[in-house]
Image: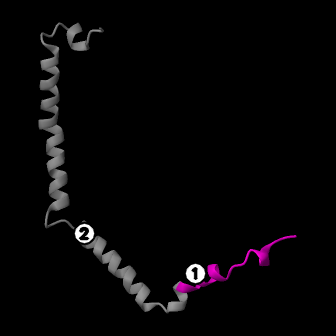
Amino acid sequence: MDKTALEDFGVEQPQSMMEQLLAMLWDEICEKVWDARNEILHSSKNKASADEMQTLEEKLLWYRRKPFSLWVSPIVFLTSYSLQSHHTA
């Protein structure tokens, strides 16, 4: 079995030292970033949900204001499309 870098440096109990190093990284860096992310996402001050709802509302209002024919015409075109009419013989 190959020696680890910690063993090469003569560290006693390198497995325990690695566990401590990973725990420190998690506690000092990852957990703080994760907590900040959760605070941003789940906070009542979160503006993302309000912005998303505003965008969806604007899209719905656009569809309600436009005549039905404007947004149905592409569908009508596709249903009336015929392969025979565009077949090259």
Residue in the picture at 24% in, 69% down: 49
Q: Which residue is mark 1?
A: 75
> Callout 1: 10 Å neighbours few (<14), some, many (20+)?
few
Q: Are marks 2 and 1 in contact (CB under 8 Å)?
A: no
Where residue 88 appears, as percent x and y from the top left, is 84, 70
First-in-chain label (2 vs 1): 2
Left or right, residue 5 beside residue 18: right
Mark 1 residue element: helix
Q: Would residue 73 be found to the left or right of residue 82 on screen?
A: left
Question: Magenta segment range?
Answer: 72-89
Residue 83 placement, left or right of 64? right
Circle 2 or circle 1, nearest the eye: 1
The prevailing secondary structure element of the residues shown in magenta is helix
Residue 41 falls in which quadrant of the image? bottom left
Which amino acid, mark 1?
Answer: Ile
Q: Is residue 85 magenta?
A: yes
Q: In screen coordinates, is 74 left or right of 16?
A: right
**Residue 18 lies within the magenta run:** no
